[in-house]
Image (cartoon, rainbow, N blue to C red):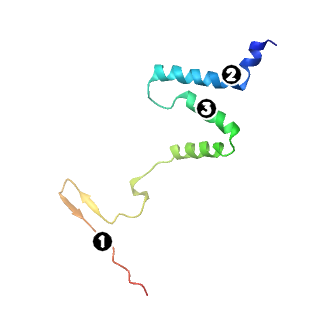
Amino acid sequence: MSLGFLFAMSLPALVAALFLLAVVERFARGKKGTPMATAGIGELGATFEAGKREELEFRKEERQLRDEEGDGAPPRSRVDLDGGFAVLKVPAQRTPN
C-alpha cells in the first residue's frame, strides 16, 4: 500500500475532505438547506462523543413531528378579525382552603 492511500483512509483526510466539501457547498449552494458537510461533521462528532448520537436522533425526531395550533391547552379567548370582535374569557380566581 502506498503512503497516499494510507493518508486517504485516515481520519485527518476525512476531516480535510469534509472541510473542502463545506467550502464548495458554501459557494455553490449559498445558504439554502442543510449542507451535506454539516451532516457529515455531525456524524463524525457522534462517533467520538457519547451524547452526540442521542442529540442527533432527537433532532431527527423533532423535524418529523408537526406542531398544531390546537395541541396546547384549550383556547380561552377567540379573536375574529373579519367580524371585528374578540371574546376574552378570564379564568376565575381560586381561593385557598
**Disc 1 to disc 3, C-alpha distance:** 50 Å
User: Of discs 1 and 2, which sits in the foreground?
Assistant: 2
Name the quadrant containing residue 59: top right
User: Of discs 1 and 3, which sits in the foreground?
Assistant: 3
The residue at 19%/53% (across/down) is 82
The residue at 58%/47% (across/down) is 58
Quarter containing the N terminus: top right
Name the quadrant containing residue 90: bottom left
Give left or right: position of 11 versus 55.
Answer: right
The residue at 70%/38% (across/down) is 48
- What residue does disc 1 label? 90
Name the quadrant containing residue 85: bottom left
- Give percent across and percent down for residue 46: 66, 38
Q: Secondary structure at mark 3?
A: helix
Amino acid type indicated by mark 1: Val
**Disc 3 to disc 2, C-alpha distance:** 13 Å
Residues 23 and 55: in front is: 23
- Give percent across and percent down for residue 72: 42, 60
How many marks the image carries: the answer is 3
Give left or right: position of 3 versus 84.
Answer: right
Q: Secondary structure at mark 1?
A: loop
- What residue does disc 3 label? 41
- Label at residue 13: 2
- Give percent across and percent down for residue 38: 56, 31
- Circle 2 packing at 10 Å, graded few (<14), some (14-19), many (20+), is few
